[in-house]
Each structure stands twice: as C-alpha cells, then as structure tokens.
Image (spheres, helix red, strand yellow):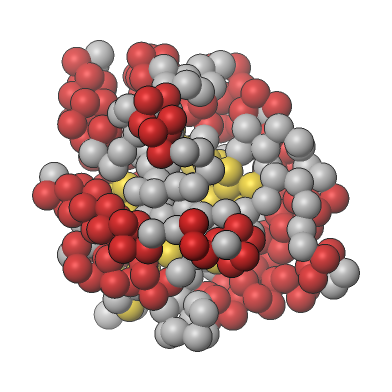
Amino acid sequence: MPRVAQVETTAGPVDAGDLGLTLIHEHLRVRSESVARAFPRIYDEEHERTRALDWVSQAVARGVRTICDPSVMEHDRDVRLQAEVAGEAGVQLVVATGIYTYHYLPEHFRNREIEYMVDQFVSDIEEGIQGTDIKAGFIKCCTDAQGVTEDVEKVLRAAARASKQTGRPIMTHSHPASGAGVAQMGIFNEEEVDPQKVLIGHTGDTDSMNYIETLLGMGPFIGMDRYGLDILLPTERRNWTVTELCDRGYADRMFLSQDACCTIDWYPEELLREAAPNWNMTYLLDDVIPALKESGVTDDQIKTMMEDNPPRWLAG
Ligand SMILES: [Zn+2]
C-alpha cells in the first residue's frame, strides 16, 4: 500500500483526502504583536476566544471541515488558542509558520543569515510550534505595496528554502495593484520552488485578467480569498473575475476564501463593521457561492475550488 499523503492540523495529521470543504485563508485572531506584548490591557482575551469559537462554529454548521489559518509572526500567533478553538468547534485547523511583514524585519532577523530564519520555519514544521507538538502545515510570507524590500526578500527566500527542505507549500500575501504576485514568483523561481507548491494570496483583489493570466502562466495557485472586503474590490467584480477564470478553465488553480479575522486590532471594531459589514466566515457560503452559481459557475467547479484543490496544494 502506498503511504497516504497527510496534512498536519492542530489535532495531528489527517489524510489529505479527508480535508473536505475547506476555507483556505481565515484568521481566528489577528493582533499587532508588539502592541499586544507591551499593552496587554488593551485586549479582551475572553471576547477574542468567544468570537473565534462563534465564527468557526458557524462555518462548521455550514459544512466546513477544514480551515487554513495563516496567522504567523507579527499576527501574535498563539497555537494553543488555535488548537483549543478548533477542538471545541470541531474543525480541522491547519496552522502556519512564517513572518508577516510588508517592509522590515526585527533586528533579530536582520542581523542573522537567511538560513537562521529557515531553521525557525523548519523547526515549526518538523518539531512543533511554540513548545507544542503541533506542526505547521504551510509557510506564510508577504509582499505588499512597498514591494520586495531587502527584508521582505529575506523572508521570501527563507520561505522558499524551508518549503524545499520540508515539502510544505507556501501561501503569500500579495498586492496585485503593484504586481507583487509576479515579483514573488520571480524569487520562488530563482529559488527553484515547484510553482504547484505556491498559492499567491489576494490575487482576487484585482479584476485585471491580464495580470491574473500572467501570474497563472508562472504556475501557482491563486487566492480569490478576500470576499467581504468590498472596500478593496466589490463582490460583484470578484465574482465576475472568478466566473471568467472558470470559463477559461482555471477552476483547478483557484481558491475561494474570505481572509476573515474573527477579531483584529488594526482598526476600532465599530469602524471595521461599518466599512466591511459582510466580512465574516460565512459570507462566502451564504451569499457568494449561490451568486457564482447564478452567473454560470458549475457545482463541479465549486467542488474543485473548495474541496479538490486544498489537498493538491497542501499535500500534492
Ligand atoms: Zn490573511
């Protein structure tokens, strides 16, 4: 019998074929790490935990079996909290290693070689995160409007090398308006990463078919993963893009998700709810997928994006 490919979750490895309906990019909690460390009085941990359990449970009630949470360094990642919430909500949670920065690194990493950073990522993947035996299922890195700064490049190359060393895939945060996804693929190519191991996140923030097809031509998966953030691109434009890409035969390269943060401290909560009222963990299943079907996306294509692509990327 050939060994069945497995995916690490907070409750240990599961067979890749058992992932089921998967949200590829959602956050149980996002905090500004240095602020949370210095001024813990600002935060209500009970509220954060309750909200995370509530939102994840609502997704589970709609059939979601697996969630990938790319919360890493600079999101104030807490793998024990992630594991507790996942266990209580009854979801398979795949957690990540990596560093979330748009521009600079702490001096600690600036003043050390790339390989030192690679070692930290590999340790999260092979030994466990934050002193637990919970292993990272994928690697997260970023490029935003600032472009590939010296420090961002260091993280991208470290992610690439950790991926090659461990076989774990990479998920990026990108900024399509500045061509960040294409720039990221350029670096991953230099590092000789298999493009099938790469998911260029936030590609759905643009409706430029030209940009998206250029990126797809480089071989990665793409994330149409910020449904509910209409301030960046309205749902109607996101749906138009996904429908068009399905028509052009790209369903096997796309993921649909929301990048929803059960709680996030970047903005005052009232402001956030007002600016993005649909940004939650069930908008995709309740509103977006029915609308996509009305615009001609087939059940098969939805299944490809929501159920078949996750094991291909995570364990391919
Ligand atoms: Zn995110």
Q: How many marks?
A: 0
| Residue at position x 72%, y 63% in the image | 158
- Quarter of the image with the N terminus is bottom left
Residue 252 higher or lower than 164, as above or below: above
Identified at 60% across, 58% down, the residue is: 35
In the image: residue 266, left or right of residue 58: right
x and y percentages locating residue 293 in the rendered image? 20, 21
Q: Which of 111 and 41 is in front in this view?
A: 41
Q: Foreground residue, 218 or 140?
A: 140
Indicate the quadrant where residue 7 lies. Answer: bottom left
Left or right: 207 in relation to 45: right
Residue 1 or residue 16, whichever sits in front: 16
- Rendered location of residue 278, percent (x, y): 31, 28
Residue 118: image x %, image y %?
Answer: 70, 71
Q: Can residue 92 be seen in this view?
A: no
Quadrant for the C terminus, please.
Answer: bottom left
Q: Which residue lies furthest to the front in this view?
A: 41
